[in-house]
Image (cartoon, rainbow, N blue to C red):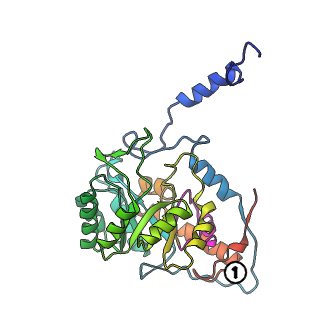
Amino acid sequence: MNQNNDAVTGASKKELNELKKAESKEIKSPWPGPKGMIPVTSGQADDANVHNRAYLDNLLVEMRVIDSIEPDLTTTLFGKKYSSPLTLAALSHLNKVLDNKTRKPMQEKAVAAKNMNLLNWIGMETNKEYKEIVQAGADTVRIIKPFADHIKILEEIKVAEETGAVAVGIDIDHVPGNNGKYDIVDGIPLGPITQEDLSSYVASTKLPFVAKGVLSVRDAEKARDAGCKAIVVSHHHGRLPFGVPPLEVLPAIKEALADSSMTIFVDGSLMSGYDAYKALAMGADSVLIGRGILPELLDGGTKAVEEKLEKMNQQLSELMMYTGVRNMNTFDESVIHNNN
């Protein structure tokens, strides 16, 4: 063994020093606001978003243009019609991040959804803040954290009903913290969600219930059996270290749920209409766009979000025309080729 190499790993001392520097280097957030308010991930091998991007970029599309026509993007979700399958993801806390406190990005996002006739999702907000955001007028899905206090979950479900939400759900994937214990968010302890718990939440409301954070056939089937009407195939922007890309497990989930009437949403590094097309072609009924509109939302507000979403709709329509997809019911997974 070279005396300049580590006796355990065999790595050179220089390599080990570089690794330690990389591990200890503080990740600089590209987002405004207090540290940690908008989480960032490492960009290293453990960062599931790195694998999302690589997987998406290796999905290539074959062309089928004979008999192709301009497509109809109209999408029916929870019994209501929307202008596009793009929906605005369940972001949270954004009203706290800007120095300019006269702006309310959560409301600006809701207004953009209303103006474009798109479904809006709202994440962890107090009941008071949630009601204020809903007043912007867009149809909403409320996503609730898996609080250790299950009474709090039931109370937030009730508020969603009272404020006219089109659906309500829970972040089933936000149970662990990075310390290996149940997470704590805004000082509120989170806890485990059993299939029995999920069934009780479904039974507590007349609203369609959504399990957000499904990344396996196993959990998809458990959500179905608990009575959920929809799932979001997701790892919550990389909460799961080394998480499999949502699109990689999507076809198997779609097949497992084929005999059900469940709606399948997908998110995860969908930054363009081309990314959204790939998700829809591989089996999603609709997609959630979060970080794909976040810079526009924080920098420019409602108008900038609308412009970004309009561009994404154009890209989606372009690829649909190139592949002979006429509407949301005629996507065909066989146009996708994995270039790995």
Mark 1: secondary structure = loop
116 vs 99, left or right, is right
Chain part drawn in magenta? 266-285
Residue at numbered disc 1: 324
216 in the magenta segment: no
Q: Residue furthest front?
A: 196
- Figure check: 204 above or below 33: below
Q: Residues within 10 Å of mark 1 (few under 14, many from 20)?
A: many
Q: Give the residue drawn at x 35%, y 70%.
A: 202
Residue 43 image offset from top left, x and y in percent: 58, 42
- Figure check: 183 above or below 68: above
Q: Give the residue drawn at x 68%, y 25%.
A: 9
Residue 150 image offset from top left, x and y in percent: 28, 58
**Is residue 288 something that shows in the picture?**
no
Q: Give the residue drawn at x 42%, y 46%.
A: 176
Residue 215 falls in image quadrant: bottom right
Q: Could you tell me which quadrant the C terminus lies in?
A: bottom right
Residue 130 image offset from top left, x and y in percent: 28, 62
Residue 3 falls in image quadrant: top right
198 vs 155, left or right, is right
Q: Give the residue drawn at x 76%, y 59%.
A: 339
Residue 115 image offset from top left, x and y in percent: 40, 73
283 in the magenta segment: yes
61 vs 286, left or right, is right
